[in-house]
Image (spheres, rainbow, N blue to C red):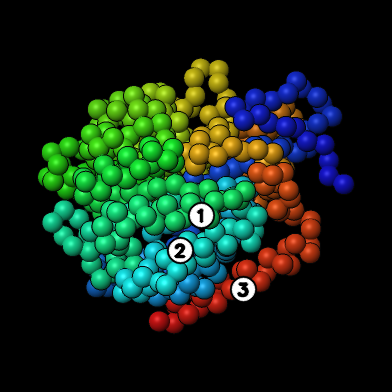
Amino acid sequence: MRLPHVVVSADGSLPARDDSVVHHLVLPGFVNAHSHAFQRALRGRVETRSTAHPADDFWGWREAMYADANALSIDDVKALSAWAFLDMVRAGVVAVGEFHYLHHDVGGRPYDDALALSRAVVDAAASVGLHITLLETAYARAGFGRPATPGQARFIFQNVQVYLAHVDAALGLVGPSCSVGLAVHSVRACPRDWIEAIAAHARARALPLHIHACEQTREVDECLQEHGLTPIALLQACGALSARTTLVHATHLNDDDVALIAAAGATVCLTPSTERNLGDGLCRTGDLHRAGVPLCVGSDSHARIDIVDELRSLEDHERLRTRKRCVLTRPGQRLAEVLVPAGSTHGARALGIELGASSVAVAMPLEGHAGGDAVGLDAFFVGGSSDDVEVVRSLAGEVIFDDVDLGRLQRFVAIETAGARVLRRLQGR
């Protein structure tokens, strides 16, 4: 039997103090709003500086990612996705936004079943009880004036009408544990007329729209060259910036960009562990937060899958950027009051879902015994991790992870083994 627990509300608030209840915390289910599940295979394999390209950066990493993307079968994608999704469930995640841009066979040949890879990731999420919002992603080109490269062939749609038809077909996958949204890979990958058409489609169907935006300075520079606008200003001009929009990364913003995002009511999804791993830079998180922009998090390339770490990094990265402390909180406000919504309700908003009866139970840090529940909750976000997760309940309230359920844990071994089998093959290429 587990010890008593403290139930934390979605806004980070706690019940009245009860000295008999200091052993566990129950938080709203975590939402991982940005994932590329197949990239789970890259962990540990891209941490050696290349002798051919010693000036390593995001663009060098991308070539390694492309190599993996073009070496995977449908079954491989399903196995790697299930492995990544299992890691998420163990970390307290109840819903994921899968930014899905593997659409075709190697070389760009369409499958007989155009949704084969979409079904693979949806089935992978279902295998571990995770809700998935499948963000079908549009990709048209390598960049301004540059056709798609061979490495991008699996991502490319012939034209925007074919992409939109693909999205409509994917709506047939919607069910209790699956929803669908649209995504523009980036302003590099999609020309203006595509962005306008995709934004209109999202509005007409009241679906979420996600976009990689301002992750790299090169992206900003090329957008200015092509359109005379920053990526954020371009999205606003295309009708793609609204309360249903989630901007992923938003690393390199100017003051006008921040104001446009706030005025539109858009959400920003930060992926701190990936942004660190890729050397992207530090987002103006504090400026966005003070402007009223909802912030959520994702594990993106899965260099690490630990939503607690992603959440505390919202504050930690801003401390590094500004060289100040307690930067996301108002005077007298607790850190958890900012981080709990970022880990739950803001992510659910980005995915267009409700959290329902989901929850994640975690061990209360010892600080809670001496300093009270509020100290314990903040201590969890500062020093805790996914290792502290004990029980996870799905959107429907069903247990999908329990750290003392040996039968369930043994069943997870098959998922890990299948993922590791794909990884061994990739390593042997």
Q: Name the residue under label 3.
A: 417
| Disc number placed over residue 115 in the picture, else none | 2
Choose mark 1 or mark 2, whichever is in front.
1
Q: Can you tell which mark lies on residue 311? A: none
Is residue 320 rendered to the left or right of residue 312? Answer: left
Q: Point out the tag, 3 or 1, that comes first from the N-terminus.
A: 1
Residue type pointed to by label 2: Leu
On the image, numbered disc 1 is attached to which residue?
172
Q: How crowded is mark 3: few (under 14 residues within 10 Å), some or many (20 or more)?
A: few
Q: Position of residue 27 (x, y in %)?
A: 67, 37
Query: Residue shown at 35%/52% (left/top)?
Result: 164
Q: Considering the image in quadrants, where does the C terminus appear?
A: bottom left
Residue at the outermost right position = 1
- Mark 3–mark 1 CB contact (< 8 Å): no
Q: Residue at x 80, y 24 (%)?
A: 18
Q: Which of marks 3 and 2 is nearer the N terminus?
A: 2
In the image, residue 54 above or below residue 275: below
